[in-house]
Amino acid sequence: MSESKDFYIENGNTVFTKDFLSRRGYCCKNGCRHCPYEFTNNKKVISLVPSWTETLIQAGVNVVGRTKFCIHPKKEALEIPIVGGTKNVDFKKINNIDADLVLLDREENRKEFLQNIKQRCFVTNVRSVEDVKISLIDLNRILKNEKINEYISFFDRVNLDLAYAYKITDIPGVLQWIKKPNESIDNIVYMIWKNPWMAMGRKTYISSVFKLLGFGDEYIKSEDKYPEINIQDLDKEKTIIFFSTEPYPFEKNIHEIKELGYFSALLNGETYSWYGYRTIQLIKSLIK
């Protein structure tokens, strides 16, 4: 920090400047004299990202539009108008809604949305657990929401570099074990699609969650974010395949999965791919 730019000394006390507090990105609730944050829940937001829709609703933000995939929390989501899906939206519907902000994500939504939406847009790029905090800080510079500020403070209190030493058979979100591993595993395949088989690779939010559980890049073999997989090439003795419930509904293919003969389980996709509020809930469950 630089004196005069970031702080000054007054009567022996350190006083942070407004510029420094703004760059920090959130309120520490210590009553700083030059605090730039004025909390409100009055901003009206259209959210085109299911994870963020849930996060905003839980924070008390006034969500005035959503996609058909924005289904949580169920009761509140049902009362919000649908403007389409995450890849195809009704721009006329969006542009006719009185909204202060439209929230998108680089991977969830299409780039051309920005050319057709007349309201102010905010685009996140969540690729890791750490990115969740960064996105919340940037978003709250606009929304100035007190609950989101609390979410940011939560991330400040936890060590995201700490890997929780889970056994592969004890990881959260397992809906059904199809074949439990009884030997050491050195390859994790998180399957997200069929025809062709597609899995999760490194540098994704999902791989970041596995890293948090103690399974880092040494367990995720592909450098591609979402590689196509030839299942026959996988070592049956060292590989475990987790079949996610989304985006492909693998729960409808349990019999076929059993016939593959791999160590495998059906995983709740929301546990591993939904971020924001879900990230916080997951971390809280890990540190209990």
Image (cartoon, rainbow, N blue to C red):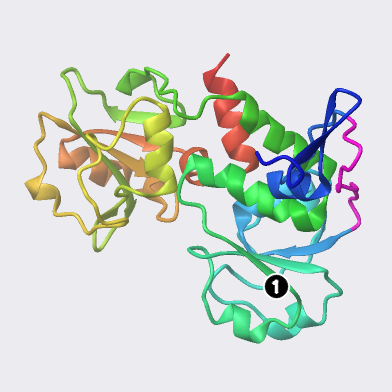
Q: Residues within 10 Å of mark 1 (few under 14, many from 20)?
A: many
Seen in the picture, residue 198 relative to 257 is either above or below; the reply is below
Q: Farthest residue in the top direction?
A: 288
> Disc 1 residue type?
Val
Q: Assign a secondary structure to mark 1.
A: loop
Which of 233/143 is in front? Answer: 143
- Against 70, residue 219 (above or below) is above
Q: Which residues are magenta?
A: 31-42
Q: Quadrant of the C terminus?
A: top right
**x and y, in percent, of residue 80 in the image:** 79, 61
**Along the horizontal axis of the image, is 55 left or right of 233?**
right
Camera-nearest residue between 264 and 277 = 277
Q: Is residue 12 visible?
A: yes
The image quadrant of residue 141 is bottom right
Q: Position of residue 200 (x, y in %)?
A: 32, 49
Q: Is residue 71 visible?
A: no
